[in-house]
Each structure stands twice: as C-alpha cells, then as structure tokens.
C-alpha cells in the first residue's frame, strides 16, 4: 500500500485548569478533552524522497512550518526513512481556532506514516514524538474522551458520554496560544479540583451532570482581549444552549444543545451574524467503524 485517505478530527476542552508554569516555559495543565465530529480530510501518497504539502486553505503554510511537515520530517529523520510523502490537506476545521485542527493533521500524519513507511511504532512512541511537535497532538492520537495532564501528553481515557449536539462559533479573531498562557494570572497551589468534578460528572454518564463543571481557565484571558467572545456566550445561552464555553485558548465558543432541533435553531440564528458556525456531534471511540478513519 502506498496511498491512504483519512479524516482528522477537532477537539474541544470540556474543562481546562492550569496548575503551574514549568521551567521550560510550558504550563502544567489538567484538562478533560473531547473529540468532535468536525474534520479535515487528508490524502497521503508515498513518493521517492521529499515531503510535499498541498492545502486548499490560504492560511495553512505549505512548507516546513506546517505541523504535518514537522511530523513527517521527525519520523523520516529519526528512523532514517528513505521514502518521501506527498500530503494533501483539505481544511474544514477553522484555523487558529482553539480546536487543534493543525494538531489533528499532525497526529493523523504520524499514524499514517507509521503504517505507510512500515515503522510499526506503538501508540506510546507516537505520543512521545507528537508531544515534541505540539501539546495537543498526543490527545489527537488517542481521541475520544480523556483526561490530559503534564503539558497535555499524559493521557487517561474516560468513559464516553452520550452523543452531544454542539454549536461552534468561531469569530473572525486571531488568538495566539502562547500569548494567552503568558497572560494568565496563576493562583498558587492549584490542585485541579474543577477538572476532578468534571470527571465525576462524566462518570455519572448524563449530559446534565457535566454542565455545572464546564470550566476553562484561559477564557478570561482571551475575553479580556476580545470581549466579543463573552457576547457570543451570552447569545448562545439566550438561544437555548444548556452550557457554553470557550475551547482551548479560543476564540471558538461551543454551546451544548438539548437535542438536534435545538441545535438547528441555534445554528440558524448564529449563522445570521457569523460566517464560521458549525453544528456537530461529539465523537466517541465507538463511532470509529471497521475502516478506521478512512473516507472515500
Ligand atoms: C490550549 C490548548 O489547546 C488546550 O488543549 C493547548 O494547551 C495548547 O496546545 P497547542 O496549541 O498544541 O500548543 P503548542 O503548539 O505546543 O504550544 C503553543 C504555545 O502555548 C504555550 N503552552 C502550550 C501548552 C501548554 N501546556 N503550556 C503552554 O505554555 C507555550 O507558550 C507554547 O509555545
Ligand atoms: N496543518 C495545519 N493546519 C492548520 N494550521 C497549521 C497547520 N500547520 C501549521 N499551522 C499553523 O498553526 C497555527 C495554529 O493552527 P491550529 O488551527 O492548529 O490552531 P488551534 O486550533 O488554535 O490549535 P490548538 O487548539 O492546538 O491551540 C496556525 O497559525 C497555522 O498557520
């Protein structure tokens, strides 16, 4: 086999606490992460030597700056792979949105090249490599519902929640993740108790049980620079969302909807004001069918 097509899915953070700043500048976090069924499509073709990237999206770099390039290069160098690869990325996940779109592409690349280049590396090793490229890549390799600690690479799978209808709104705002972490006011001696409550809610297995524990410590930092995010949260609530939160470092806000009808109503209304609005469901590991993440 020398070709493969996959879907790579975005994530949201149901809970995110920052425990402390580390010596290397990164932050220790405690997060509950959830894969959602919003995806990019990727095509891989083995070629003699080079790593060539194409994308339909103007903001996605096509050179060494692309996360996908970094992932391919890392494996090629580390394992002295003689082959190259041509990769096409069809973006659907908004870029710089707090949804780990680039990280999902990077994770997909590690998985596919592990197979196409015949490396046979276990998931644990891919996670180690992924962490060096981006903190969200380890979770994107695992997928489903999980607790993420460390800088995001220490992962523990959590029970799947029932499927949840979500509305995502991505305002036309650019947010730098590094800036958000830098501007966080850290309180001392944090234990991660908000995340603990979210995990307990998830274990009880009902959507209502997680609503009180939606929490994102980065939200206030991003909102202080972009008050429009607070406006979106308010509007989603007015339209009937049961819970609302900014994902990751933002600016995307997600609203948890009671059912499909409510989601459609909210979607229609938010679409009047924002171009990038998505109606999606959460994605659980059980949703992966026999052909994995393939698409035709
Ligand atoms: C906000 C989240 O998306 C939540 O899932 C992640 O923590 C960020 O993950 P990411 O975008 O993959 O992060 P990276 O690309 O590795 O890092 C971008 C920048 O964010 C900061 N960063 C990121 C992750 C982390 N645990 N601590 C940090 O301080 C660092 O300044 C880093 O230079
Ligand atoms: N394959 C890729 N897809 C999207 N962006 C990429 C990719 N490779 C590199 N980038 C660059 O990475 C930056 C962040 O992109 P991405 O869409 O992953 O952000 P994000 O959703 O905020 O990620 P996170 O939630 O992990 O912080 C963008 O500025 C973009 O130029």
Image: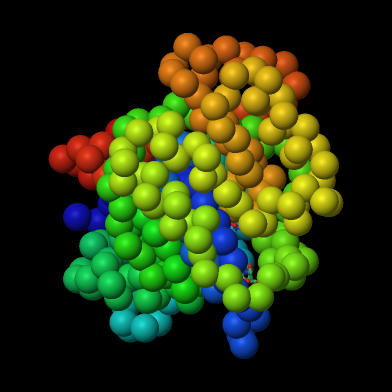
- x, y percentage for residue 139? 40, 59
At 37% from the left and 50% from the top, the residue drawn is 200
Q: Residue furthest bottom?
A: 23
At 63% from the left and 78% from the top, the residue drawn is 21
- x, y percentage for residue 268? 62, 14
Residue 126, placed above or below residue 248? below
Tell me the quarter of the image containing the C terminus. Answer: top left
Residue 278, placed above or below residue 265? below
* Residue 166 as seen in the image, left or right of residue 209: right
Q: Nearer the viewer, residue 64 or 212?
A: 212
Whether residue 72 is visible here, answered yes or no, is no
Instruction: Give the quadrant of ligand 2.
Output: bottom right
Q: Nearer the viewer, residue 139 or 44?
A: 139
**Residue 287 position by quadrant:** top left
Tell me the quarter of the image containing the N terminus. Answer: bottom left
Residue 35, placed above or below residue 264? below
- x, y percentage for residue 155? 36, 65
- x, y percentage for residue 179? 75, 65
Q: Nearer the viewer, residue 19 or 145?
A: 19
Whether residue 131 is visible here, answered yes or no, is yes
């Amino acid at each position: 086999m020398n070709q493969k097509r996959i879907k790579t899915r975005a994530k949201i953070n149901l809970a995110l606490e920052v425990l402390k700043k580390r010596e290397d500048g990164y932050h220790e976090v405690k997060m509950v992460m959830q894969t959602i069924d919003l995806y990019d499509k990727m095509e891989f073709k083995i070629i003699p030597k080079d790593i060539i990237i194409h994308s339909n999206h103007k903001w996605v770099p096509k050179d060494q700056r692309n996360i996908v390039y970094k992932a391919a290069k890392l494996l090629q160098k580390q394992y002295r792979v003689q082959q190259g690869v041509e990769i096409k990325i069809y973006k659907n996940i908004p870029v710089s949105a707090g949804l780990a779109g680039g990280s999902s592409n990077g994770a997909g690349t590690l998985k596919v090249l592990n197979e196409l280049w015949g490396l046979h590396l276990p998931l644990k090793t891919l996670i180690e490599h992924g962490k060096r490229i981006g903190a969200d890549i380890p979770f994107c390799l695992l997928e489903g519902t999980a607790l993420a600690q460390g800088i995001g690479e220490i992962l523990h799978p959590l029970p799947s929640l029932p499927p949840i209808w979500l509305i995502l709104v991505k305002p036309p705002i650019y947010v730098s993740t590094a800036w958000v972490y830098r501007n966080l006011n850290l309180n001392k001696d944090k234990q991660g108790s908000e995340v603990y409550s979210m995990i307990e809610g998830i274990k009880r297995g009902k959507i209502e049980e997680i609503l009180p524990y939606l929490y994102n410590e980065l939200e206030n930092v991003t909102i202080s620079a972009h008050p429009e995010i607070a406006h979106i949260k308010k509007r989603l609530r007015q339209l009937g969302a049961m819970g609302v939160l900014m994902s990751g470092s933002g600016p995307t806000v997600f609203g948890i909807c009671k059912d499909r009808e409510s989601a459609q109503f909210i979607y229609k209304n938010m679409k009047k004001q924002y171009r990038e609005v998505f109606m999606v469901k959460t994605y659980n590991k059980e949703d992966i069918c026999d052909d994995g993440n393939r698409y035709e």
